Amino acid sequence: MMDFDLLFDRSDLPYVLKQAKTLSKEECRAIYNYFEEYKPKRILEFGTQYGCSTRVFIEISKWFGIDLEVHSWDINDQIRSDCVDRNSFTFHKEDITGKEKYIIDTFRPDLVFLDAHPYELTKNLMTVCIEKDINFMCHDVSMEIYERAKLRSDNFTNKSLETKAEWELFLLSELISPLIMEKECFENEYFIVSCFRDRYGLAIIESKIRKIFNNIVGNGLFIHQKNTKVVYTVIFGDKDRLKEPEYIDEGWDWICITDNELIKSEKWNVIYVPLSNKCNLDVRQKYKLLKMFPHLFLPHEKSLWIDGSMQIYESINELEILLNNSNIVFYSRGCNFYQESKILTERTQNKDHINNINKQINNYRRLGYPEDSFYAATGVLLRKHNEKDVVVAMKKWWNEFMEFYSGRDQLSFSFSLWELKTKFDFIPGLYPRGNRKTKYFKIFGHNGKGTVKCR
């Protein structure tokens, strides 16, 4: 017998699932499989009703030994004690329409479960989850329910006034892909969608980049926020020595994420994260993913990324002003993109990487990337990393980086901003080569073995 069947038979879930408008056994199995992979620690549920689905989350989390926190919202309190223990989760009797982004940002969920139905609320929650790469599930996505919603949508110019329709599938077809109407499982550039058409229907929407991130660090990377701004770096292995800043501005958190337990610091908040081998990525690719996607794990509004080879020695507060005009700021090397690309190939020893750089450059030239384009330095990145234009640009950057993998991310960064027409600004001054410094940063070469700071 499968583990899920054991759980099902040994609990009172069969009784709970007999209640009206709740999950089927097969939908529960899909949730069980999701929990087994992702191990979510915080779920936000919208549409509590009797508390049946809440009970499912709690029972499955106990089975896996997950310390789960569930917050559930509804405008009515219909919770039944024979379905769920009120003390096992937090119930919010509140209409959060218009507050969706605030709720998501405040609670920082690992998973969102949508079963509330109102058009505006459901659309807003889906939109926030999509923009922030938060995995979510939607109940009531059967074709029968969709046809009912579509019929009502044809009769209502203002769908927000229609309160008797379940809008989940209707909105998924608009916001994710109309393929959800035809296929039970599919994926596009950014999402993996699985639909279970049993009884009322359940859809599970997984962010591809979130899935990769989870396969690298699991669900153990949780950052405690003291300020709205953060300086962060990542050091995997012993390639770099963490450098203590010579100057620390108030109002910034300082975070170093590493898999090296020898790295210690009196000024940085060092967060140890053992790397997983679930995904087929090398260490450099794993490092780049955390560099490119701070919105996946940093709760802050603004972030300053610095490479592990760098040290801050002056106040960085004045850099923040640059974010008044754009959401992403960085150094330029002040040289021609194609000329610098040629230099890269001359300095690269890996033949596969040389071939990929040449393919990349030829492709960008074919797509019309201007000959006189700037060449970015990505060792320092100042971002409002939660803003939509930044998240979209980072996804484009990652896709280009992975398609033409050479270990270098500068080429794909410059092109991605150009193709998406992303607004950006330069940090004053040029990014130097070698062991030199700018106004704010000292730049060192990468270290060999035995150079981490220990105590």
Image (tube, rainbow, N blue to C red):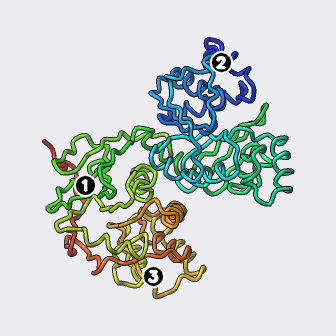
**Which one is in front, 196 or 1?**
196
**Which one is in front, 338 or 16?**
16
Q: Position of residue 185 (x, y in %)?
A: 72, 44
Which image quarter is the N terminus in? top right
Which image quarter is the C terminus in? top left
Number of residues whose C-alpha sits closer than 10 Å to that of mark 1, classed few (under 14), some (14–19) or many (20 or more): many
Q: Give the image quarter of residue 302.
A: bottom left
Q: Are marks 1 and 2 in contact (CB under 8 Å)?
A: no
Residue named by callout 3: 338
249 relative position to 388: left or right? left
Circle 2 — which element? helix
Q: Identify the residue shown where x is 37% and y is 55%.
A: 300
How far, Cα to Cα, is label 1 from label 2? 51 Å
Residue named by callout 1: 240
How far, Cα to Cα, is label 2 from label 3? 62 Å
Number of residues whose C-alpha sits closer than 10 Å to that of mark 2, classed few (under 14), some (14–19) or many (20 or more): some
18 relative position to 294: left or right? right
Q: Which amino acid is tagged 3?
A: Tyr
Label 1 vs 2, first from the N-terminus: 2
Label 1 vs 3, first from the N-terminus: 1
Circle 3 — which element? helix
| 210, above or below 248, in the image | above
Number of residues whose C-alpha sits closer than 10 Å to that of mark 3, classed few (under 14), some (14–19) or many (20 or more): many
Q: Position of residue 412 (x, y in %)?
A: 48, 69
Q: Which amino acid is tagged 1?
A: Asp
Residue named by callout 2: 13
Mark closer to the observer (1, 2): 2
Question: Quick one: which residue is furthest to the top in this view?
Answer: 10
